[in-house]
Image: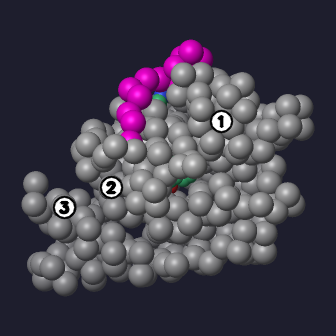
């Protein structure tokens, strides 16, 4: 029997890549999205596909969540309002969507008796913990409203596993990047924002001296983790959280320079664009690098792309897609 997956936030960056992947593997995929930050053009290749269904709706509405979960085998819950600065500017809406919406989805998935609920957690849960590499069990205090919402997701998932016998797995994503990540808007992530600026010969601004570091994670690694989490039959591997990363770190300065180098292959003038520096951003964690030991051991995860390989593919995609439009 063809298995059914509900992907919330399926019109967004990560969600639309998950939709493509699982349609390609022969699943029936339903996307639930309200297009708050996602785009119809992320789904245009799927709209005519017989195995694809779009539900335009909001996870803050419990009835919509129930309707979307009916007869689904798995839920990959991606819908949320991302971005630390957005949550600082408007903590109430971030909380309504990321906590209220999450709880609605858990209840709906429980009532529909789905086999497994895999959800997007976040490396922001490590908060002010200084230990490196980040190991799942050692977290600090959250540094932003966004980080609180993502941590609360983990607490709720844990309680739903224990109280209702649901199978939940949280994936703590570390700075994901790749095709379709939105370069536009006030809350754009650093890599696509820098790409679009460099392509216009505008100087990107690094917050601080550029020595902060991140475990930048290419989208294909994230897809792999979702698939492994969804399908694992090892009971020791469920009802827990996993770092979803490469297990390496790159400074913001090095990332910006590598971006320039890869973009210069397409347009040599980009090599001359200067990088500027601005003030450090409130709520930013100075350094982030994951241990991926747990995912390797329990889910047999092996990242397919290190940072440089992923960045090269991402740059190629942006060049093709942004210059064609
Ligand atoms: P995105 O903004 O591209 O995707 C989020 C999607 O959720 C969008 O399509 C948006 O329209 C949808 N959405 C928002 N509010 C909704 C609502 N009320 N009802 C229905 N749909 C709604 O972001 P992304 O980078 O693809 O992030 C996906 C998930 O991964 C989020 O939960 C995010 O918090 C988490 N995450 C992302 C990263 C990263 O580096 N991109 C890191 C850690 C965690």
The residue indicated by pointer 2 is 180
Which is nearer the N-term, disc 2 or disc 3? 2
Tell me the magenta residue range.
Answer: 52-64
Q: Is residue 7 visible?
A: yes
Classify residue 157 as left or right of residue 94: right
Whole-number angstrom distance, CA of label 1 to CA of label 2: 24 Å
Q: Quadrant of the C terminus?
A: bottom left
- Quick check: is the Cβ at mark 1 less than 8 Å away from ligand 1? no
Q: Residue at x 78, y 69 (%)?
A: 298
Q: Nearer the viewer, mark 1 or mark 2?
A: 2
Pointer 3 local density, CA inside 10 Å: few below 14, some 14–19, many at least 20: few
How many discs appear? Answer: 3
Whole-number angstrom distance, CA of label 2 to CA of label 3: 9 Å
Q: Which mark is residue 149?
A: 1
Q: Is residue 119 above or below residue 268?
A: above
Q: Residue 316 location, x and y as percent? A: 25, 73
The residue indicated by pointer 3 is 321
């Amino acid at each position: 029997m063809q298995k059914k997956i509900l992907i919330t936030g399926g019109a967004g960056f990560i969600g639309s890549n998950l939709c493509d992947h699982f349609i390609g593997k022969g699943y029936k995929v339903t996307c639930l999205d309200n297009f708050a930050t996602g785009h119809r053009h992320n789904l245009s290749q799927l709209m005519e596909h017989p195995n694809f269904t779009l539900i335009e709706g909001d996870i803050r509405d419990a009835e919509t969540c129930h309707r979307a979960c009916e007869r689904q085998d798995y839920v990959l819950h991606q819908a949320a309002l991302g971005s630390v600065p957005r949550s600082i500017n408007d903590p109430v809406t971030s909380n309504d969507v990321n906590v209220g919406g999450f709880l609605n989805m858990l209840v709906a998935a429980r009532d529909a008796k789905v086999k497994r609920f895999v959800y997007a957690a976040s490396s922001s849960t490590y908060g002010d913990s200084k230990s490196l590499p980040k190991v799942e069990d050692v977290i600090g205090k959250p540094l932003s409203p966004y980080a609180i919402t993502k941590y609360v997701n983990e607490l709720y998932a844990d309680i739903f596993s224990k109280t209702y016998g649901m199978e939940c797995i949280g994936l703590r994503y570390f700075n994901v990047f790749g095709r379709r990540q939105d370069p536009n808007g006030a809350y754009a992530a650093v890599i696509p924002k820098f790409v679009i600026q460099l392509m216009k010969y505008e100087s990107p601004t690094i917050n601080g001296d550029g020595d902060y570091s991140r475990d930048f994670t290419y989208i294909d690694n994230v897809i792999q983790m979702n698939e492994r989490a969804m399908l694992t039959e090892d009971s020791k591997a469920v009802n827990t959280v996993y770092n979803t990363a490469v297990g390496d770190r790159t400074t913001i300065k090095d990332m910006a320079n590598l971006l320039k180098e890869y973009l210069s292959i397409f347009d040599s003038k980009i090599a001359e664009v200067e990088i500027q520096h601005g003030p450090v951003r409130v709520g930013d964690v100075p350094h982030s690098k994951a241990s991926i030991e747990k995912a390797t051991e329990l889910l047999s995860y092996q990242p397919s792309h290190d940072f440089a390989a992923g960045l090269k593919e991402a740059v190629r995609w942006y060049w093709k897609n942004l210059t064609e439009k």
